[in-house]
Amino acid sequence: MRLSHALIALLIAPVLVTAQGNLGTYEDRIAVEDVMARYVWAVDSLDADGYVAVFTEDALIDSNGNISKGHAEIRKIVTSLIQRRDDNKAKGLPASNLYHVISSVRITFPKPGEAVHQSYWQTVRRDKDGKMIAAAMGRSEDRLVKRNGRWLIHNRKLTVFTD
């Protein structure tokens, strides 16, 4: 009887080690969560410098086929939101600031120095009457890399639900 327990333990041990490896270390998981939180706070507060700081120099964002590559193009995402806010204010319209709600987060580590962060997201904003309304929703898959001891977003794929 004891031999069968030992045999079972030997057979499942590699599976447990693989599963644990895909979950990453506590430190790496917390660092990835922090990068993704800084991403959301930067875009919602229209902080272009903070936004760009969470991406690698050669990062790529694919938002339903609209591609932004590198820091200069990625910065334009936030600066265009700032411009839209300022244009709306000049017209006496609501600022149209977006606020993100992130849910069902899943983080895996396919290999050392690489992480995948998946989540669903929803943005809310104020309408013409000042009421908070859903602006958009979808899912995202972010591929992060660890460079010089820091986790950064290398590739961001946003799927905006259109149905």
Image: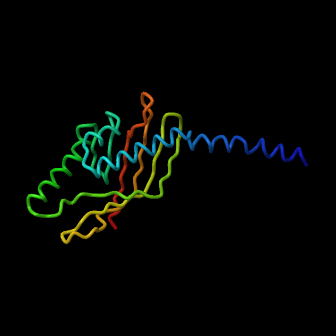
Q: Work out which quarter of the rendered image holds the C terminus and state it.
A: bottom left
| Percent position of residue 62, x then y | 32, 48
Front residue (pair 163, 132): 132
Q: In this view, does 157 lie to the left or right of 96?
A: right
Which image quarter: residue 84?
bottom left
What's the residue at 43%, 40% (across, down)? Answer: 144
| Percent position of residue 57, x then y | 31, 33
| Percent position of residue 147, x then y | 42, 30
Q: In this view, does 153 lie above or below 83?
A: above
Front residue (pair 61, 34): 34
Mark count: 0
What's the residue at 32%, 60% (across, down)? Answer: 123
Q: Is residue 71 above or below residue 64?
A: above
| Percent position of residue 87, x then y | 11, 56
Q: Is residue 117 left or right of residue 1?
A: left
Scheme by which the image is coloured? rainbow
Q: In this view, does 75 lie above or below 64?
A: above
Outermost residue toward the right in this view: 1
Which image quarter: residue 60?
top left
What's the residue at 24%, 48% (across, down)? Answer: 46
Outermost residue toward the left in this view: 90
